Image (spheres, rainbow, N blue to C red):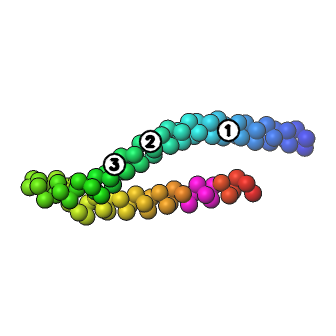
Amino acid sequence: MEKKTREETIKRVEEMQQLYEQVLRDKKELGALFSKLQKADKNLQALSDYYSSDWMTDQENVKENYPVLGQDAVWEELVSRQVLYAKILKFCTNALIRQTT
């Protein structure tokens, strides 16, 4: 019985070792994802700033069809990003709570 228990223990440890190695890879990918998120937020903020300043003047002066000059397109993107950020925040909050319990 002890041999089987040892074999089961070794198997479990090996599985956890593989899981640990995956967690390390995940950490690297999450770091890259965080950098991407920061860049994406900077882009969105620049678009939001444009929407709050020069957008209306440009809309009146430019007759060509640019999607960015459409009122709904920019606004919907700003709102959809807020919804996505809220989902990310909720996920991260729940993950932090799980880590502390």
The type of residue carrying mark 3 is Ala
Residue 46: image tag: 3
Q: Give the CA distance from mark 3 to mark 2.
A: 15 Å
> How far from the left and from the top, in percent, is residue 27?
59, 39
Q: Which residues are magenta?
A: 90-95
- Quadrant in which residue 25 is drawn: top right
> How far from the left and from the top, in percent, is residue 68?
22, 54
> How far from the left and from the top, in percent, is residue 44?
36, 50
> Mark 1 or mark 2: which comes first in sequence?
1
Q: Horizontally, is 77 left or right of 64 in the view?
A: right
- The answer to the question of whether label 3 and label 2 lie on touching residues, with beta carbons closer than 8 A, is no
Residue 36: image tag: 2
Q: Is residue 69 above or below residue 23?
A: below
The type of residue carrying mark 1 is Tyr
Residue 49: image tag: none
Q: Is 3 part of what is drawn in magenta?
A: no
Quadrant of the frame with the C terminus: bottom right
Residue drawn at 71 percent across, 40 percent down: 16
Residue drawn at 54 percent across, 42 percent down: 30
> Mark 3 or mark 2: which comes first in sequence?
2
Dot 1 corresponds to which residue? 20
Nearer the observer, 30 or 12? 30
Residue drawn at 79 percent across, 37 percent down: 10
Q: Is residue 37 above or below residue 14?
A: below
Quadrant of the frame with the N terminus: top right
> Mark 1 or mark 3: which comes first in sequence?
1
Q: Is residue 76 visible?
A: yes
Q: Give the CA distance from mark 1 to mark 3.
A: 39 Å
The type of residue carrying mark 2 is Lys
**Foreground: disc 1 or disc 2:** 2
**Foreground: disc 1 or disc 3:** 3
Tell me if mark 2 has few (under 14), some (14-19) or many (20+) residues whose alpha carbon lies within 10 angstroms of its own. Answer: few
